[in-house]
Amino acid sequence: MNSEFKKKMHTALLAIFLLLVMCIIIQYFSISTFNSTLHTYSSVDADSLDDVSAKTSMDIHYRGSNTSSWIKRDLDIYGIISDARVFNGTTSSISSWTLRVNIKGPCYLNQFWNGDVEIHQNVGKDNEVVQTINLANYDEEDIKLEFMKDESDLLIPLDEGDYIVYYPEESMREMPIKPGDETVVGFIVYYEDSVDLSDYTFYYYFHKNYYEGPISLVIGLLLVWEFFALGMYFTAAYVYKRADREMELRKSGLSSMSGLYTIIYIVDIVEDRIIPVSFPEGLDKDRPKNLGANEQFKNLYRYYAAESYVEPLLEFGDLTTLPERMKNRNSISIEYISKRFGWSRIRLIDMDAGSGRPVEKVLFTIEQINDEKKEIDKILSQVERAESESKIKSAFLASISREIKTPINVMIKLTDLILNRTDDKNIESYAKSVISSGKVLMAEVDSVIDYSNLEVGELVLKPDDYSLREFLDEIYELIAPRVKYTGIDYQTDITETIPDKLHGDYVRLRQVLINLIMYTISRNRNGGIRLGIYGKIVGDSKVHLLITVKEVESSTEPDEKIKYYHKYMEADNNYHRERESGISMDLIEGLLDAMGSSLSITDTYGNGNDFYFEIDQDIVDRNPIGEYVPRESEIIW
């Protein structure tokens, strides 16, 4: 930072600070003096005022209502209620106050609410007594004053020269008194002929906060100036420091870049000149230094670049179009083959990136990238070979699977002929078992084909009309062998108002649900599984389905044969089961993605997993499916 600027800033900051301290001291003493000054207001002032509401005032007056005066006939004395009214007509609060009333004739004090009363009785006599008492809450045994009782009334006799001092009660909001506000205190006295309460003095203190007054505004302005000056100082220090740091980094960066780049130039686009920074010995001697930067680069490209790269380099290195091409960009680069160095890369870097100004200076670098190119070509070759092998494997697997489908179809058709032409119950049961097993095998083959098509990106959806009831029956028929042997409790929960006749790729939808159910069975052999299909009609021709496969508690106990099967399954190789499950989930997610849906899962602690997805299907017929119960298989497993 410039030393002169630094000195001026220090002087300004010190001056503002001293002014601030001086103002704070003045404000503190002025407010403290104001708050500690005792003010008085006597009945003499009250008589001479024309407008008592214009400033602080006190007056004592007879209340004047029908219930505010009475006679004690047994003592032949009169009782009245009087009010002492305090009004604050200033702009400051009255923090505390007291009221002294001088007695000018014989009377009896009965009540003074709500605070304490300091009573001076028999003033100037040998038996003078002074006692502070709360006339609303007292114990007769504690009273030192002369008094008399008339029924429940306490009467304290006072004579000329005596006086009382009232201390207001803060809890009864008698103080503080806010600006423009007032408080009223009532008291009761008794007298024989008359009573004179016109001789009184009001003592009070004002209160101001230390942030009030014109000096506080000056303090506030000085604080703002101080923080503003500090902000300017630290900002300037930061900017200067950052500029110095950037200059050092630029110097060290340019020198360190010489180890990475063959040639480094600074190009001044505005002045059309080149400033050499780093280059191999003897390489810069052929540069036509008498020409402008644009012409020098044209000669460089024509002299060093392979012929097929000259035109692209001339277009890339045109400095007249560079500011527009580097708009919102920090750098641009091009790769070419150099006659001398082989594969090379030219990079143009904006030296004032982030400033918001058009490009004026760029860093021109040439880097040899022969080894980098070899590594990239090697990696690309390996990736292409791996992708090619994967596609070949997937295509081969899909082709073999399609070939397998033909004999399976023939087997199912021939078995169906046997089933239709035999009356033997055993043969009929065996034939049904063969057909069911064939369908299970066919579903597995379809899964393999679709998985292979997904890998090579050749899956094609085939939507068709189908019955939701028959669709559910087919699913149960295909999973029945696994359900029965594992002892899984298979449940369904189908919304009865869903249309039965729908249109969609039910074959892929069936594969999704079969694989999802099988996946769930492989992880839950002791409980149950609930297939849920819920939906609502959307518009005139679509139904939105929410399909779930959820693990639930079983309602039955597995028999001995099932327990033996469990033991057998636990002895199986877990590695193969995990791998098959992973392939099943990939297939499920791939098929759902192709149908415009996605699989979600919620894991409720202690209650198993809940797999679900949403999908739209077209409506063929609005007749609802009604109550659905899985059709029991006729096959004895």
Image (tube, rainbow, N blue to C red):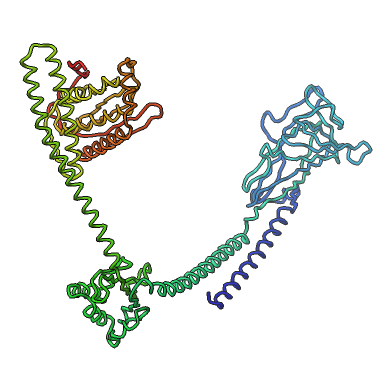
Q: Position of residue 584 (x, y in %)?
A: 25, 35
Rendered view: 587 above or below 285? above
- What residue appears at the point 12 percent right and 33 percent down from the top-left corner? 404
Figure quadrant of residue 331 = bottom left
Image vertical order of residue 163 relative to residue 619, above or below: below
Number of marks in the rendered image: 0
Residue 458 pos. (x, y %) = 15, 44
Q: Nearer the viewer, residue 536 or 152?
A: 536
> Residue drawn at (67%, 29%), measured in percent from left and top?
66
> Position of 112 compared to 122: left or right?
left
The one of 593 and 154 positioned closer to us in this rendering: 593
Query: In this orientation, does residue 409 appear?
Result: yes
Does any portion of residue 540 appear in the rendered image?
A: no
Q: In which image quadrant can residue 544 be found?
A: top left
Question: Is the C terminus in the top left, top right, bottom left or bottom right quadrant?
Answer: top left
Q: In this picture, is 143 found above or below 221? A: above
Nearest the eye: 174 or 109: 174
Residue drawn at 76 percent across, 49 percent down: 44
Q: Quadrant of residue 18?
A: bottom right
Query: Residue at left 74%, top 32%?
Result: 80
Q: Is residue 265 left or right of residue 146?
A: left
- Viewer-nearest residue: 234 or 473: 473
Q: Is 164 left or right of 413, judged from the image as shown?
A: right
